[in-house]
Image (tube, coloured by chain):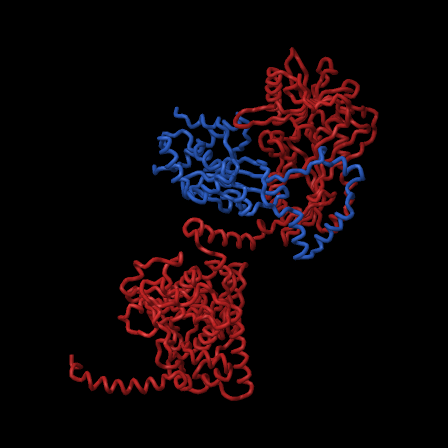
């Protein structure tokens, strides 16, 4: 028989492939639960179990597996696997783990094995030969686990020599192998697994016997030792053989000085079973019959760095509820991308830092919707506290928040965001936004406070990518409009009437000179529109250029106004001051302003995207550049008719908030300019030329009137 | 019955047949029953401990360990390093040799996959749940799972989207598992059954047809012997 290079004729020392550990995450789940609910501070040894398998494909390491069921009694091995009896030592502290006498613990297990061998218990239940020791320390706050396995193996006193290593099909005929399989199956089925056994040739066929049948066998010198071998190496047997040889050397060394060992490897591939690759070893077994004390024991598992030290695993990603919430939120959004919108850039949305000015109905709903899109950084600003009427409409508050004078709104909303989703980086700030036409006064303290408030707002706008204007007054939107425009931030505005809403993205001024020029930005890209839109002058709604305005020529919230923001809260009754609107309106407007932002973020030109409009029903036919669809300038909705329009309007060159002169004064004079705007009622109108415009218009009116006199009667 | 779906009753029959074949083949499937609702328990199939040697660009445990010692500098990591330096505490000098791989090779890194086949009532189709762990029990990240998909399936997964991998709570065990989302299963099965000119009712084992189509994506191959269940009787 050809024996290939593997069967060396001269004897050499028998070596074994060490056992490895393989853990399923379910094991750690179960251990955590046991520690919390059952063991608590009890660190006494606990019985657990594992199993190994002798049917793995070539090249895989032999290993003892532990999983969720490892704590169950009786042992629940998967089919065709073999049990291993474990001892768990779960320590309460890392120090206890470190200082435990590991040698002594291993020797305790070795002593168990030795006792089972000498008492004969292992002859009746040979699975007692497979044991392991597991030391653990579980940090259940961080879901970090430190662990160290040992697979105790009793050492022979003298070295065991192997004179020949062959494959099963090199030693035996097909018929003999067939008989071996059938005989093994018959006994294994009765016993629910049989990891160690005896084999003897009878009538030229191979017959399997349990260890307890030793005394019944004739001619014991012809007995083969058989074990199920988890090792897949071509030359070496696996670890379980070691304790089996110790048993044989103790009980049967007289008969089995030179013995054949069958390393049974039993694999089913594509429905075809084979054991041909099993090894047959011819070995010389030194006797241990005279040994009266437990032999030396080895078996600590090395760590990943191949050192004799414990391993550590961080399972926070799969066990920490906070981390789990984060990954499932991400996954939910990814599903949208995979299934519907492959070009969606979710990271861009997630990384967008949003500043929400106003934490009322709009602020709460906008924050919730942003959170749904995976935005993680939200800063809320408000200057009031939660009142009893708020929680029913303002979706981040509860009744408790309105007790004892009410919590500050912005902070309460930010706290709630983090409760809803711990992955949020939410901050709340109490801050009053200075308003034009609301005189600041001249006392040192007030002036200092206003200066600080402006500085804080500038700092906040600097630190975010998007500013949402969600306040309940018009004039409080003025200062952030100026600052946001100057700093070239995306400014998103939502405003409510009783049953009408307006959502607008402010036009993005062209990049400042000297600033890094974004390639996909300026208005010459307007060529992408269906009509020429370079000429900013024609403002007539009939002009074709009205249909398509590039992003840097779009207006802001104030552009359509011909009066400067003044004190709109003055001379109003209570119900007018608290903007009273249909309750669903805020949800609609908040949802739209967030969706508009996300569409804009997905547009290749971002804030410079030209506006899509509903004029001439263009919105029904225009090609979509953002994967999410249209990016209108404004959305105006009328709830009474469930109707919405997508108008767009040019930036007004006399706008009190975004005209060149206002931005220039703000950028050159800074706070002094702002202070005049706050204090002097007509300053902004004078500055921008609105005053003159009003005067001119009045003249026009008169002229018009006289001209049209003849036809006004219709 | 609508096309491409399977009733709970048929599912139960399918998996019993499947389980019997597995037993004959020593294919390692276990039949389990949901414990809580013993009255109307639906059986499910489990195959544990399937080891796959994966060439995943793994960060490696060593890498992970370092990463954390940097970010946290916790006492646990310091103690671990300390123990590594005092290496050999577990045994004496010869042990290092004794527990080494006999041929001196490094142990192959392998991942453990467990597969669960559970009935999904909403979609009326079977669903394949699986867990995938490194040897220390750390779950493979979704990216690592994607890397584990054979390259020829990756293209199919991307382009046809007949199924895709996601992470969900196991409906019976309540722990996070990966799964092949069931929302395209009925479509897939309609197409497959049509191609083989069968219908779900005349077809004698839906489960085998389905599992042999989707299983290989996540390393679960079915021996051909199961196909016998699909032959018309």
Q: In this view, does B121 lie above or below B78?
A: above
Chain in red (letter): A
* A688 to the left or right of A191: left
Residue farthest top in this picture: A203
Q: Can residue A672 be seen in this view?
A: yes
Q: Can residue A400 be seen in this view?
A: no
Q: Residue at x 82, y 31 (%)?
A: A293
Chain in blue (letter): B
Residue farthest bottom in this picture: A442
Residue A537 on image: x %, y %: 33, 74
Residue A211 on image: x %, y %: 70, 22
For the residue pair A311 and A82, the one nearer the viewer reads as A311
For the residue pair B131 and A320, the one nearer the viewer reads as B131
* A474 to the left or right of A66: left
Number of numbered markers: 0
Residue B60 on image: x %, y %: 64, 46
Q: In this view, does B206 lie above or below A42?
A: above
The quadrant the C terminus of chain B occupies is: top left
Residue B48 on image: x %, y %: 56, 36
Picture quadrant of residue A212: top right
Q: In this view, does B145 lie above or below A603?
A: above
The quadrant the N terminus of chain B occupies is: top left
* A671 to the left or right of A242: left
Picture quadrant of residue A274: top right
């Amino acid at each position: 028989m050809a024996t290939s290079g593997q069967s060396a004729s001269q004897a050499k020392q028998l070596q074994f492939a060490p056992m490895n550990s393989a853990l399923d995450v379910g094991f750690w789940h179960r251990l955590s639960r046991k520690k919390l609910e059952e063991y608590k501070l009890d660190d006494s040894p606990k019985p657990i179990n594992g199993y190994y398998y002798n049917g793995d494909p070539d090249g895989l390491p032999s290993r003892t597996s532990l999983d969720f069921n490892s704590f169950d009694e009786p042992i629940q091995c998967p089919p065709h696997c073999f049990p291993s009896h474990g001892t768990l030592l779960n320590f309460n502290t890392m120090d206890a783990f470190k200082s435990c006498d590991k040698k002594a613990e291993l020797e305790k297990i070795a002593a168990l094995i030795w006792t089972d061998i000498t008492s004969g218990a292992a002859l009746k239940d040979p699975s007692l030969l497979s044991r392991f020791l597991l030391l653990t320390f579980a940090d259940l706050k961080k879901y970090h686990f430190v662990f160290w396995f040992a697979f105790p193996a009793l050492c022979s006193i003298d070295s065991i020599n192997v004179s020949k290593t062959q494959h099963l099909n090199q030693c035996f005929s097909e018929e003999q192998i067939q008989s071996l399989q059938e005989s093994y199956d018959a006994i294994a089925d009765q016993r629910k697994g049989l990891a160690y056994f005896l084999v003897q040739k009878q009538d030229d066929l191979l017959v399997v016997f349990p260890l307890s049948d030793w005394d019944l066998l004739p001619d014991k010198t012809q007995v083969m030792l058989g074990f199920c071998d988890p090792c897949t190496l071509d030359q070496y047997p696996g670890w379980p053989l070691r304790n089996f040889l110790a048993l044989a050397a103790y009980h049967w060394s007289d008969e089995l000085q030179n013995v054949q060992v069958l390393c049974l490897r039993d694999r089913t591939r594509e429905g075809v079973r084979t054991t041909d690759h099993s090894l047959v070893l011819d070995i010389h077994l030194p006797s241990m019959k005279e040994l009266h004390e437990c032999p030396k024991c080895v078996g600590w598992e090395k760590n990943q760095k191949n050192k004799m030290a414990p391993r550590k695993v961080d399972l926070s990603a799969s066990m920490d509820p906070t981390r789990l919430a984060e990954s499932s939120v991400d996954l939910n959004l990814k599903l949208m991308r995979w299934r519907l919108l492959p070009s969606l850039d979710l990271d861009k949305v997630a990384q967008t830092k949003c500043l929400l000015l106003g934490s009322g109905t709009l602020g709460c709903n906008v924050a919730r919707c942003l959170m749904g899109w995976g935005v993680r950084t939200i800063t809320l600003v408000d200057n009031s506290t939660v009142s009893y009427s708020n929680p029913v409409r303002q979706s981040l508050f509860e009744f408790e928040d309105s007790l004892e004078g009410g919590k500050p709104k912005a902070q309460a909303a930010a706290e709630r965001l983090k409760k809803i989703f711990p992955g949020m980086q939410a901050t709340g700030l109490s801050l009053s936004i200075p308003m034009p036409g609301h005189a600041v006064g001249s006392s040192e303290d007030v002036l200092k406070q206003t200066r600080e408030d402006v500085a804080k707002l500038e700092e906040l706008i600097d630190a975010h990518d998007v500013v949402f204007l969600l306040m309940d007054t018009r004039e409080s939107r003025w200062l952030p409009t100026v600052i946001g425009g100057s700093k070239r931030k995306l400014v998103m505005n939502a405003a409510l009437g009783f049953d009408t809403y307006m959502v607008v993205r402010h036009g993005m001024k062209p990049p400042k000179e000297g600033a890094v020029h974004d390639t996909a930005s300026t208005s010459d890209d307007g060529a992408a529109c269906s009509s020429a839109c370079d000429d900013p002058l024609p403002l007539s709604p009939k002009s074709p250029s009205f249909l398509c305005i590039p992003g840097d020529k779009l207006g802001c919230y104030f552009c359509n106004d011909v009066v400067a923001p003044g004190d709109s809260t003055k001379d109003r009754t209570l119900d007018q001051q608290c903007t009273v609107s249909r309750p669903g309106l805020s949800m609609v407007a908040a949802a739209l302003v967030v969706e508009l932002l996300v569409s804009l973020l997905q547009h290749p030109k971002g804030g410079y995207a030209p506006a899509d409009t509903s004029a001439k029903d263009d919105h029904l036919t225009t090609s979509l550049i953002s994967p999410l669809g249209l990016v209108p300038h404004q959305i105006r909705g009328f709830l009474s008719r469930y109707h919405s329009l997508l108008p767009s309007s040019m930036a007004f060159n006399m706008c009190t908030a975004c005209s060149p002169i206002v931005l220039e004064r703000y950028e050159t004079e800074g706070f002094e300019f702002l202070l005049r705007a706050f204090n002097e009622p007509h300053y902004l109108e004078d500055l921008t030329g609105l005053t003159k415009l009003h005067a001119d218009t009045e003249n026009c009116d008169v002229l018009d009137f006289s001209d049209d006199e003849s036809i006004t009667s219709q | 019955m609508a096309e491409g779906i399977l009733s709970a009753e048929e599912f139960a029959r399918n998996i019993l047949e499947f389980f019997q074949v597995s037993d004959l083949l020593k294919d390692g499937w276990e039949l389990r029953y949901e414990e809580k609702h013993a009255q109307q328990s639906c059986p499910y199939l489990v195959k544990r401990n399937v080891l796959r040697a994966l060439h995943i660009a793994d960060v490696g445990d060593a890498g992970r360990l370092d990463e954390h010692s940097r970010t946290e500098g916790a006492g646990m990591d310091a103690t671990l390093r300390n123990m590594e330096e005092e290496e050999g505490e577990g045994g004496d000098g010869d042990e290092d040799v004794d527990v080494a791989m006999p041929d001196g090779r490094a142990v192959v890194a392998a991942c453990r996959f467990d597969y669960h086949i559970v009935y999904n009532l909403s979609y009326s189709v079977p669903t394949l749940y699986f867990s995938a762990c490194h040897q220390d029990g750390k779950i493979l990240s979704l990216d690592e799972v994607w890397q584990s998909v054979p390259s020829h399936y990756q293209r199919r997964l991307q382009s046809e989207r007949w199924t895709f991998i996601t992470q969900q709570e196991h409906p019976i065990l309540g722990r996070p598992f990966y799964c092949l989302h069931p929302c395209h299963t009925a479509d897939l099965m309609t197409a497959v059954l049509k191609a083989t000119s069968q219908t779900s009712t005349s077809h004698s084992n839906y489960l085998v047809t389905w599992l042999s189509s989707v299983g290989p994506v996540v390393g679960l191959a079915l021996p051909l012997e199961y196909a016998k269940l699909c032959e018309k009787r």
